[in-house]
Image: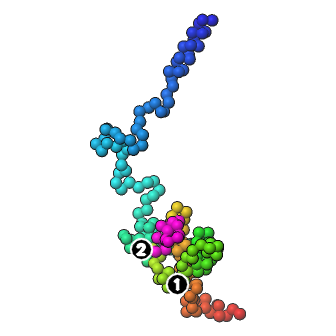
Amino acid sequence: MTRALTFCVLLTALAAGCRQDMHDQPKYRPLAASDFFPDDKSARSVVKGTVARGQLNPDDRFSRGRVGQELVTDIPVSVTRSSLERGRRRYEIFCGPCHGPLGDGEGMVVRRGFRHPPSFHIDRMREASVGHYFDAISNGFGAMPSYASRIPVADRWAIIAYVRALQLSQRAVTSDVPPEERKRLEAEP
């Protein structure tokens, strides 16, 4: 019996000595002082030019809507029927509540008492560069918040293409229609 008791005591002492908690290891608290490095900081600064994984966008025209500090004037992606359709769907989700389905600034949010956004059909907005629209979507403008975290870059360009199509649709004249389509439209009752 004493042998079994001695074994249990020894086993308990051995188990207690095997405890290795992570909090017992040497470490520095974030931003704590340290005399190990010449700048007296325990944390190392990010190496200049470091880009987080998934954040590298070498094409500023596409990713920022700018060339240097100048806003781009043309959409840097090809505009297709499917991209316009995607832009319409994204516009209805993110922009339509304030800007309205026609882009006239008469969305449901405005009808509920919030500030009026400008109509996309006024001269100032028709003359604004596509880079201006990209910047407004990405960084916010006035009462409009930034949508950079909610709308991917490609979808921002699709929305801008759709806004341009809305602007054209509200001021279209017969001469804007291609001749073969115009003949077809004129032949319909």
- Which residue is most to the right? 189
Q: Position of residue 81 (x, y in %)?
A: 58, 76
Numbered range of the magenta stretch = 132-147
Mark 2–mark 1 CB contact (< 8 Å): no
Q: Residue shown at 41%/67% (left/top)?
A: 60
For label 2, the residue is 71
Residue 92 visible to an observer of this rendering: no
Q: Secondary structure at mark 1?
A: loop
> Would you say residue 56 is visible in this rendering?
yes
In this view of the protein, which residue sits in the foreground, 2 or 144? 144
- Asked if residue 135 lies in the magenta stretch, the reply is yes
Front position in the image: 113 or 93: 113
Residue 166, labelled with which disc? Answer: none
Q: Is residue 62 left or right of residue 171?
A: left
**Relative to 156, residue 120 above or below:** below
* Distance from Cα at disc 2 to Cα at disc 1: 20 Å
Q: Amino acid at mark 2?
A: Leu
Queried whether the magenta region covers residue 8, the answer comes back as no
Say what amino acid the circle numbered 1 marks. Ile
Q: Quadrant of the C terminus?
A: bottom right
Residue drawn at the location 36% of the way across and 70% of the way down:
68
In the image, residue 97 lies at what x, y percent?
62, 72
- Say above or below: 72 vs 54: below
Residue at the spot of label 1: 122
Specify few, some or many for label 1: CA neighbours under 10 Å numbering under 14, 14-19, or 20 or more: few
Q: Residues within 10 Å of mark 2 (few under 14, many from 20)?
A: some
Q: Residue at x 52, y 18 (%)?
A: 14
Q: Counting residues from the N terminus, which is met first, the one under dot 2 or under dot 1?
A: 2
Q: Which quadrant of the view contains residue 80?
A: bottom right
Task: Work out whether residue 149 or residue 109 is closer to the camera in this orientation and state it.
Answer: 109
